[in-house]
Amino acid sequence: YTTHADPRFGTAQAIRSKNLFDLETCDMTLAYLPEPENGAWPSVGTVWELGGAVILRKPVIVVTDSARLARHPAIACAGWLLDNLDDAVEVILGVLTDYSRRPK
C-alpha cells in the first residue's frame, strides 16, 4: 500500500468499509479463484470477504480449478464449491429466481 492512498477510496479503512457495505447489501457472494500462478495463494482480501459473507449468512459460491484451494477450510466453507463459472451461473439462477421461471 502506498502512503499517498486516496483517503476517500484507497485507504485500508475505506476499502474495508466498501467491502462490508457490498457484503451487507448483496444477495450472494461469488468468488472466482483460479489456480494461482507459481503456487501463490489467492488474494487475502477475497478470502476475508468469503468469511464475512459466511458470518452475514449470505449464500457463497466459490469457483476454483485448484484442488489445493478447494481443500482449504476457508474455501471449503462455501455453500457451493464448483470448478466452472457456467455451473455457478446455474446455481445463482436457481437460488435467486423462481425455479419454475428459470431458463432451460
Image (cartoon, rainbow, N blue to C red):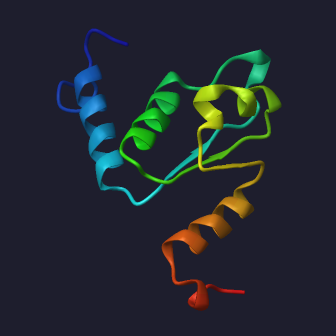
- Say above or below: 54 vs 30: above
* Residue 81 x/y as whole percent: 69, 47
Q: How many marks?
A: 0
Q: Horizontally, is 86 left or right of 58 in the view? A: right
* Residue 88 place in picture, x, y as percent: 66, 59
Name the residue located 76 percent from the left edge and 53 percent from the top edge: 84
- Extreme-left residue of the structure: 8
Task: Give the residue at x 52% y 29%.
Answer: 47
Residue 87 x, y percent position in the rendering = 73, 62
Q: Name the one closer to the observer, 42 or 100.
A: 100
Relative depth, front residue between 7 and 32: 32
From the image, which quarter does the N terminus lie in?
top left
In this picture, residue 62 sits left or right of residue 9: right
Q: Where is residue 8 in the image (x, y as percent from the top left)?
A: 18, 31
Q: Is residue 12 above or below residue 15?
A: above
State which quadrant residue 67 falls in.
top right
Q: Residue at x 46, y 56 (%)?
A: 28
Give the quarter of the figure containing the C terminus.
bottom right
**Could you tell me which residue is drawn at 76 percent across and 31 percent down?**
35
Q: Name the outermost residue toward the top.
A: 3
Query: Left of 12 or right of it: where is 59?
Result: right
**66 vs 28: above or below:** above
In the displayed orientation, state which residue is furthest to the bottom.
100
